[in-house]
Image (spheres, rainbow, N blue to C red):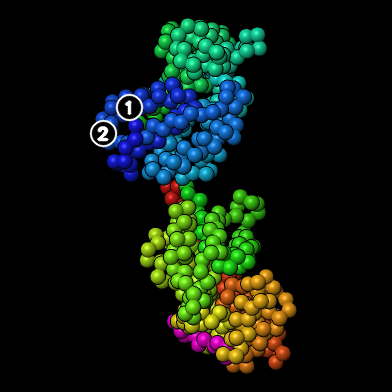
Amino acid sequence: MASTAHLSRRSYGIIGGLGPLASADVFFKLMQAMAADGDLEQADVIFEQHPFRGSGLASTATTERKLYVFDMIRDFEKRGAGAVVLPCFLSHTFLDELRANTTLPIVDMMAALAAHVRQAYPQATRIGVLSSDYTRAAGLFERYFPAPSFDVLYPHAADGVNPVAEAVYGEHGIKRGNLTGRPLQLLTEAAHDLAAQGAQVILPGLTEVALVAHALGALPAPLVDSNQVYARSVAAGRREARTKPFKVGVVGGVGPAATVDFMQKIVRNTPAARDQEHIKVHVEQNPQIPDRTENLIGHGPDPTIALYATCRKLEDGGADLIAIPCNTAHAYVERIQPSLSIPIVNMLTVTVHSIRERFPQLTQVGLLATSGTLGSGVYQKALEEQGLQQLAPSPAAQEHVMEAIYGREGVKAGFTEGRCQDDIRIGLDDLVRQGAELVILGCTELPLLLPFAQVMHASGKTITLVDPTDTLARRCVEYAGAGMQTAEHNAAR
């Protein structure tokens, strides 16, 4: 059953296939619960079931199962579902892994079951469980019924065989469509075993057990229909909202070495004591974006669509903001930003703002950049808005700057020493002669040639070099930190 109406209000995606009969049972009982609450016409339910190729007990929580469930959740995300229904105890053993990689709330079947036991059987402390060996070994029920408040009990094996597993997975088990006879006998014997151990209430640890709960008849301890409990919990709208991890999207490949340099600066500027404290980053490495300078000086194809398409991929991938570690590409930002729903952090403006804050008495700034960047006037505009005058190399010196970047032995060709160093020094010398004491490295490859924050010029002056890539990285780290704090605050409210 799938529908598209009302998905933004109340919508659920049920993952079937792991236990086809039991999943259908949860689906049916969810429909009953919503009908009883008068919500049947107010919600959409997507019941999705595909053949799951996991074979028997040995594959109960393998990578195969995890990827199957995760792919189903991703599909529900794309289709606009509001919550995931996961009627599978085995899959709840890796629920934390699933939640860490999706923003969709997954309705916790075990939490619903624990809440039901505490409400319906408030005096129960000895909990019997009819489960598979894997779920037992994983300690799933012990997490929700922890000692010393509870004592979790399991049936004894018969001749080394788990009677519950045999009832469900055996040759004539419930998974093969046998809902009477031998499977019910095995489950009844297991329930009596639990009661003999002192179980005050019995819980299914396999959804197939709940499927036949009412067919087992009178037992010495009450057996909970976990499928019905779960369905009622879903219908009641009990779900845990997930906090979306903040993600920085990066338009990569413009150029490739500069992207790597930018990523290093993101990592270096992030206050983290371990891997998990670093920022989530999505890099869309697209070196096929047409050359920005060639277009701006009038000889190359327009990169607007390619830049926009790359930004849209980042947007679709869940990025919260976009960083473009390419100065020249910022000549196109005003064209594409209005069509995006997330902001592009403008490297040029954040760099100029940083300069103004650090050097309030400064009046002029030198710029080493491509001819395309210079010709577009994007830096000049940003500088003038802060009351700063742009100094650019003379035409002759600019030719050397372009050679340092694009030449056969330039930085874009993979060189960082030799002729490219001589060429960039000519451009820098020209700016110093014009009076520049601070110079923006306005091409993201130039910090690879001039990696120091300050250089001593032959004239005896100390020249400050500003790296926009580093400024952009710092600002992205700041935004990510603020975004994560906001998300945590909202989640706590």
Residue at image position (63%, 81%) is 403
Does 383 lie within the magenta span? Answer: yes
Decide which of 375, 431 is in the foreground and name it: 375
In the rendering, at what x and y percent does residue 201 appear?
49, 16
| Amino acid type at mark 2 | Glu
Residue 97 lies left or right of residue 415; in this view the side is left
Visible residue check, residue 143: no
Which residue in the protein does label 2 denote? 41
In the rendering, at what x and y percent does residue 238 appear?
39, 35
Which residue in the protein does label 1 denote? 31
> Which residue reaches farthest right?
418
Visible residue check, residue 221: yes
Residue at image position (39%, 32%) is 47
Residue 416 lies left or right of residue 322; in this view the side is right
| Amino acid type at mark 1 | Met
Decide which of 339, 345 is in the foreground and name it: 339
Crowd around label 2: few <14 · some 14–19 · many ≥20 (10 Å):
few
Residues drawn in magenta = 382-394
Q: Which mark is residue 368?
A: none
